[in-house]
Image (spheres, coloured by chain):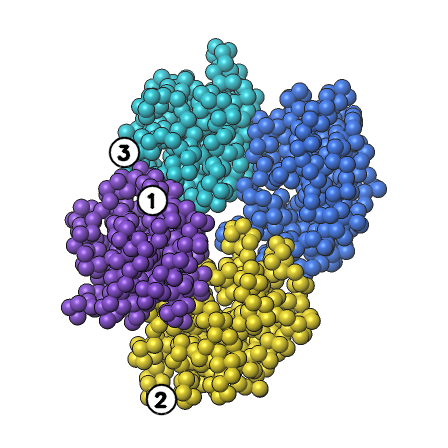
Chain colours: A blue, B cyan, C yellow, D purple
Amino acid sequence: MEKILQEAILHGQKYTHNGNPASYIPELQKVNSSDLGVYIRTLDGKEYGVGSYQQKFTIQSISKVLVLTLALMDNGFDKVFGKVGVEATGDPFNSIVRLELKHLQKPLNPMINAGAIATTSLILGKGGNEQIERILDFAKLVSDNPHISINEDVYHSEVQTGDRNRSLAYFMKSTGVIEEDVESLIQVYFKQCSIEMNCQDLARIGALYSNNGICLKTGKEIIPKSICRTVMAIMTTCGLYDASGEFAVNVGIPAKSGVGGGILAAVPNKIGIGVYGPALDDKGNSIGGIEILSYLSDVLDLSIF
Amino acid sequence: MEKILQEAILHGQKYTHNGNPASYIPELQKVNSSDLGVYIRTLDGKEYGVGSYQQKFTIQSISKVLVLTLALMDNGFDKVFGKVGVEATGDPFNSIVRLELKHLQKPLNPMINAGAIATTSLILGKGGNEQIERILDFAKLVSDNPHISINEDVYHSEVQTGDRNRSLAYFMKSTGVIEEDVESLIQVYFKQCSIEMNCQDLARIGALYSNNGICLKTGKEIIPKSICRTVMAIMTTCGLYDASGEFAVNVGIPAKSGVGGGILAAVPNKIGIGVYGPALDDKGNSIGGIEILSYLSDVLDLSIF
Amino acid sequence: MEKILQEAILHGQKYTHNGNPASYIPELQKVNSSDLGVYIRTLDGKEYGVGSYQQKFTIQSISKVLVLTLALMDNGFDKVFGKVGVEATGDPFNSIVRLELKHLQKPLNPMINAGAIATTSLILGKGGNEQIERILDFAKLVSDNPHISINEDVYHSEVQTGDRNRSLAYFMKSTGVIEEDVESLIQVYFKQCSIEMNCQDLARIGALYSNNGICLKTGKEIIPKSICRTVMAIMTTCGLYDASGEFAVNVGIPAKSGVGGGILAAVPNKIGIGVYGPALDDKGNSIGGIEILSYLSDVLDLSIF
Amino acid sequence: MEKILQEAILHGQKYTHNGNPASYIPELQKVNSSDLGVYIRTLDGKEYGVGSYQQKFTIQSISKVLVLTLALMDNGFDKVFGKVGVEATGDPFNSIVRLELKHLQKPLNPMINAGAIATTSLILGKGGNEQIERILDFAKLVSDNPHISINEDVYHSEVQTGDRNRSLAYFMKSTGVIEEDVESLIQVYFKQCSIEMNCQDLARIGALYSNNGICLKTGKEIIPKSICRTVMAIMTTCGLYDASGEFAVNVGIPAKSGVGGGILAAVPNKIGIGVYGPALDDKGNSIGGIEILSYLSDVLDLSIF
């Protein structure tokens, strides 16, 4: 397995020079753009890592998966999907157009920024501090890593450049999708994006979803099976921004990317994968990370189709 | 298995009164809107049918699956996906807006009308007659039914009311996506939509995709495996119009619906399913058909997630 | 002339019951919706008023005319029209879609909210307090009324319900159209909307534009002629939201409406008119006010066409 | 006056090298792109011409003015404006997006292609031949030139490249805006665009509108005054595609441009102007023609504002 992972990294390295780190958040540019790492956890508990798999990065949009899961556990399907839909958009992640065109009802899905902000607003807790604490605790729980924390430098960098997200949030406030204070909500959102993990953390989270929410160590249910399936379905249709369809066709694995360079992947009933590569393509996905997953999907026959 | 199918039909019957047959094609309204049928073919060759599974109906948008498959076999991935994308839209099936907004490049995917018309234009053949003949032959081949034919009444009904599709085709002609004569192309498109099948035909087609394109009877490859997987991925992300995401979440099976009331479903490596129920929901999907598939997915654990 | 104005009021009264006061700002609903007033100032200095012409109301979007004028005087044509265009939109006043679709360049014109907010950001002054003070001073100057002030109740009412405008402002901040602090800017914007005037004030302002910016009393130039013409042209093409074209066809007078119920009208080289009627049509224009202006345009032959 | 016109031409010549002839209709490229002509007719019957004012060109979108006028005379205001609106769009002339977004109701105005095609469908006459004959007769009447004819080469060139217009027409057919046969209608539309005139013809038409529809020679009413005013208002708000607002601000004269290089201008109660210059800016307006009109507006004080 380790040899396959090494080949996957070699394959991915052919592509990293075509990408660039995220430029809109200054702090995210301070990376080595040729870094690549991959980590796998199988459902019988084995783990394999190659490359920069210990390198920490902020999870950014991958947090949308965790927050959607927690929001569903907090509120149930009806309440969450009354606020946010589950349809893919074919739009860039920060588009505002469809909010207005779709009759102001609700964001199209929880994997675009508008939908994610609306989802975050549903996390239980008295005020923003309690909300982000609960999100961080949940991140620790699902990654089985009590040392997960928020990268304060990235968080402050997000705060300064997050005007498009503020615009989305105020728009939804004006249409009633969001009820709470926008600035408090947006701080929680920036903080969840700034949670720091490595490939190992992502692989363990992926394995938990793959295993229908049952902890591999204890056998206890951490996430209900129906929520795991729902989240993996949404990852499949909406997980890679407006390249989600292409990824489904070429790779065929439920996955979620973040502009920090990470991708969380969960092959149902098989394995969890974490990849990292901060060089992004023009849609905001890790260019080497996609190639690694594509390679592994082919060699290990991981496609769900 | 037959008992399960009967229960599925009973479950579906609770919903048919909430839907209506397609109204925009006059001929499609001449149906019994409470009809429901289901047919299953397993990969070990067993078949089960319950309800109106012998009832013929026009496949309408289900033809998009067949034509995409044939276009890929005729032209290869690069040529086809140079003309049409693979991203879901969240738009109704007949929307023209995104063609213009997305910089005139290409239709977002082959499961919306614009993308399907562009795909049809890639079917090899001298003129429209040869194109539709090849499509019909392919339909006979994959359904293992030499008696498949075109419903002329529906075809003529489509011709008269197909102005939105003509608009889409002329738009793409003006932007260079389509090169051939629009009126000839649109006739092929209307004819492929008017191909008549029953649930048994759909189930056998579904089983062929489930079996990665290998004929269950002869063991011969009818469709290359990579094309089967690609088509099933696109069915998953775009197969039920702007309810594709909801279907992925609730049912989790690659499927394609048509406004004639049919749904073609293919569970990878497991079974093929054909359902029929002409009462449609407001997005154009068989309301009872979706419920039958949802029931079967739960009971038989068919979700790919 | 007074008889004509009385007839105009009688004509307008036939329509007020079809409209309603603005509902989205709570404070604006506290009006008598059957009120109607009209005031005229001719360029030879005569003035006539009938109906509720002394009734004060907040000028709301009429402030866009004053702020555009002051921004042009502060910055010149090139700087202002580098930030905001001059094309009509056919969109509702608070639409955000076109900001994104039009390649993020700049708001289409200074009479829609996005364009007005961008225009306000160009008003010279150290901070929001100095900006709004300069706007208020300019309002006093052009209306020749030193008692003009801000209605604090309406201002506080705007602040609470102004999330759509905040969304527009943050969007423009994210694209670089706006550089200053959004919350400070938006306070200035809400305050300029809450400036209180009556029909007499509006008529005097209108007469100043009609007279190419030359004060009727002193003969001094208050606004350069080229700016007056530019502003009257923009009032003609964009002054009544997405009913601007209809108003140009039916009335043919440069005018600007506000959801407070006022309309400022300026007939080039002839007269200035102020009308008031808080019952609005579904596009946000005073329903009786439009009818009064339509009546006067016919009887006094005021159309510029 | 002739000296002023010569200076205007000299002024315009500084800009022609920045533009290009229309490229989307092959036949329109066969012009001398540095040609410039201007012709003026005053309401006391004097006429002045300078430059290529005898050069014939196809009127293209200028036909929209004639057809709107004739449609209003044929059907009255209510019927015409029940089919097509009067709001400017800020969109390019051939945009289809707003047709769909604006709830399929009706094209925004008769000066964009969609609205013009809908207007043409209202011209009385048995079939396309009679319709185009009536339009041509009307063109001869208003230009006082019985030799006006259709340029067959351009017409055939339009037919071949008119797929975007066919798309617009079929879209409107599908939504019920248009009831007649699309191909017949589109032929009439292409023919009206191919009507050939020179600057003199345009100036005389302009003078007729300026004179409220009263023939300068006979004193007879050719077009009702209310229709003249309506058409001049629509020219002001929508006459130069998505540069209409800019033209209103900079020039301030009701005008309509065509991609053949002509501009028809009508200064109410003053003069009619025809200009020609086939080098177009990127919005499809004669780049030299606009400059000539801008120069004349300044020197002769022609702005209506």
Indicate the secondary structure of the residue bearing disc 1. loop
Q: Position of residue B240 (x, y in %)?
A: 48, 37
Q: Nearer the viewer, residue B70 or C239?
A: C239
Q: Quadrant of residue A233?
A: top right
* In the rendered image, residues at marks 1 and 2 fall on the same chain: no
**Distance between the alpha carbons at the discs numbered 2 and 3:** 68 Å
Callout 3: SS: helix
Give the residue type at disc 3. His
Q: Is residue C231 above or below residue B228?
A: below
How packed is label 3: few (under 14 Cα within 10 Å), some, or many (20 or more)? Answer: some
Asked if residue B55 is positioned above or below residue A165 in the image, the reply reads above
Q: Quadrant of the C terminus of chain B?
A: top right
Residue C167, position in %: x, y? 60, 59
Residue on which the image places disc 3: B156
Residue topped by disc 1: D31
User: Mark 2 — on which chain does it sit?
Assistant: C
Amino acid at dot 1: Val
Q: In this orientation, does residue A102 appear?
A: yes
Q: Crowding at label 2, few (<14), some or many (≥20) Cα neighbours within 10 Å? A: few
